[in-house]
Image (spheres, rainbow, N blue to C red):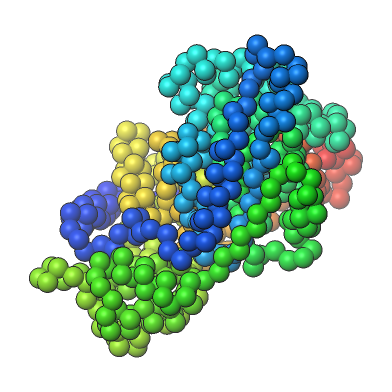
Amino acid sequence: GSLRYSQKSSIRSSYSQSARNVNLESLQMNKLRFSSLGLHGRKKEKDDLNACFDRLARAPARSDGIGIDGDDMKELNNLRRPSEVVFLSGESGTGKTTLAGSIKPRVVRGKGVYVHGKFDLYLREPYFGITSAFREICVSIVQLKNLNCIKYQELCDNIFAEVGDQIALLVNISPELQEAIGITVMPNAIAEQGNKEAKERLKYAFLRFFRVVTRYLSHMVLVIDDLQWTDLSSMELLDALIRDEEISLMFIGIYRSNEVNDSHYLMKYLQGMREANESGIFMLTEISIGNLDVATCEEILVELLSQDVDDTTRSLTETCHKRTNGNVYHLLAYLAMLQEQKLLEFNIGNFKWTWDSRRIEDETTPCSNVVGLMKGKMKKQPRAVCNLLQLASCLGQSFDKYLLTYAYSKMHDGESEDLAEMEEDLDHLLSLVVDEAFLEQHTPSRFCWAHSSIQVAAMHLVNDDQMLVFKFKLGKMLLQGFEEGLESNIFVIVNLLNSLECPVTDRLAIAELNLKAAKRAAEISAFESCVSFGERGIALLSSESWSQQQKLTLEL
């Protein structure tokens, strides 16, 4: 139940032993090379994506309008290609994100920009998927600065000219934008305006920004993942982006077909997109993928094992397909499990992989629960790794290292360890979990889960009741550490505190925090989230609140 981790020496020694094992294994050929695995069984779907990008790339270059009169500018804009809109669906684990990412090399060769955003199941932060994509756009802007300072300055000047003071609205949802374009703006509070006017102002700023950015970062491919967890405000912004006649990009929306039904607003939105497809503003493509057949699973095994097809390979393939039903993520997790349990081993003597198909058939069960497999793998890691994974799972699908570092340091509060040693331990542990493919490091300061199933597995390393207590204590800990910079982490902290029916002594303080989160959501026009935080705050008030906390009650 305690939030603090102890046994500093065991953390360091358990890591050191694991690190030595990892380093030894990396020098040998005895590990399946999943990271180098190509895309299998998706040729038609990949061709469809490539065709969409090629149509976009054939469009004439957009002009920033400098030195061009009105008639010529109108003619140029009339030549623009409509945006390419792709909705990619399939069940969890079918490889949707990998398929979308398969066009990235083509985009880079075509001097385009590939950006990826992802919504989060647990951290329902407003515009989360859009802000994660915005973060990557900011990285591309900074890269432009390093490559072509003059073009970068023109981009910034045009952003200021087009967006004006409304740039503050974008900084509200993506603070990284300030550093990327070299400005400092005051947060623009719009909570006192009506919902419709506030949303229109944000949409105006959002579209004007993209009109400029897509001229300078041409052939942009914007991928938004896990749309089944999106919020309505985000969908409204994305819809405005897709339908804007002055913006030409390729949008790929990814969602899990098994987690939406006909009543889900994403499905209703898609129906509207089909009806509007004839408008000429965008070109709609829908791609649905399923599980792989036996032949494709065999291709994957042949590549991973680096050997020809024979009876033993076919036997292993049939068992793997039967156990995983051809779900590619389940298949790779199943193979990793076989290797860990030494049912699939690399024989140094004859320099090839060996296995006993009958033994595999007898000793394994169907892999329909990949979360269970991931939990099993995690529990075999050193305790310090499990603790870190459990902690990181509470911070969202992606998170900044500074937030993890602070939380990790508080977990070890009271130990005789200076800050430098603690950060060294954390860096070692992060290196290990990245090597084990639990996390991916996108930038030196930002990490994300390799798959949402891994985050779910980390959350279930302890039982649900223990996890709720863990989240609540973590929320209180982060609140103490970020009182001055609360605004930038308000949604993370309040979501953690809302995870548990809090003690009576904390109810008033958490109601006030929900009010702050509601106001913050209103400032960025995320009114559905505003309502959610407001309702949670009201539920925490006592029956005497109108007489005892009249101001708070009224504001909520």
Q: Could one spot residue 121 in this view of the protein? A: no
Residue 489 is left or right of residue 323, and the answer is right
Q: Residue at 35% x, 33% y: name it.
A: 419
Front one among 69 and 307: 69
Q: Is residue 205 left or right of residue 152?
A: right
**Relative image position of residue 375 (x, y in whole percent):** 44, 66
Residue 66: x and y in percent read: 65, 13
Please, which residue is most extreme toward the top here? 67
- Image quadrant holding the C terminus, namely top right
Q: How many marks?
A: 0
In this view, the residue in front, 384 or 160, is 160
* Residue at point 55%, 44% (across, down): 54
At 68% from the left and 40% from the top, the residue drawn is 82
Q: Nearer the viewer, residue 9 or 446?
A: 446
Instruction: Write down the quadrant of residue 121 in the picture.
Output: bottom right
Residue at the image point whose x is 59% and y is 28% from the top: 61
